Amino acid sequence: MTDDQLNFSINTAADDPDRMYIRRRLREWTRNEAAGFPPRAESPLTIVVKDEQGKFVGGMWGEAFLGCLDIYFLWVEQEYRGCGVGSRIMQMAEKLAKEKGCSILKLDTFNFQAPDFYKKLGFTEFGRVSYYPGGPVKCFFQKKI
């Protein structure tokens, strides 16, 4: 097949339905290829913390897949930082990951965000990517549970 027989397109919209199709197809293929691995739960995970008035305090979202909980985002509002909210969210995530059959947690953070926070929680750094000299560094962490 040649390029003139195909239609290549670019879409930068966050709600592009093809994004989910690509993800779904890759997951289907991965499940089939990993069929020999012990079965593990696959599920999204969101933890939300709100105050008594229902105001958002913090939260995390990630996904369990093939025995690993990928933590995509963790956010705690500024006024609640240092009060244990983030640590409690991560403890809950770890507990739920174990219940889902996960044996590892994985996440990334920039060097100006929270690498020390994750180290304090027992995560170990396993890689870094520098975007440009003197610029931000993305740090990759894991925690075996």
Image (cartoon, rainbow, N blue to C red):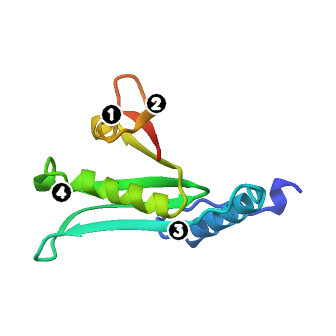
Q: Which residue is mark 2?
A: 128
Amino acid found under the numbered disc labelled 3: Ser
**Is 24 left, or right, of 83 in this rendering?**
right
| Mark number, residue 43 | 3
Residue found farthest to the top: 133
The kind of residue on which mark 1 rests is: Asn
Q: How many marks?
A: 4
Question: Which residue sits at x=61%, y=56%?
Answer: 66
Marks 4 and 2, how far apart at CA: 26 Å
Please report contact status of discs 3 and 4: CB closer than 8 Å, yes or no.
no
In this picture, residue 68 sits left or right of residue 59: right
Where is residue 109 drawn, in percent x and y?
37, 42
Residue sitting nearer the eye, 94 or 61: 94
Q: Name the residue that disc number 1 marks.
A: 111
* Residues at circles 2 and 1 in contact by the CB criterion of under 8 Å: yes
Circle 4: element type? loop
Between 98 and 87, the one lying in front of the other is 98
Dot 2 or dot 1, earlier in sequence:
1
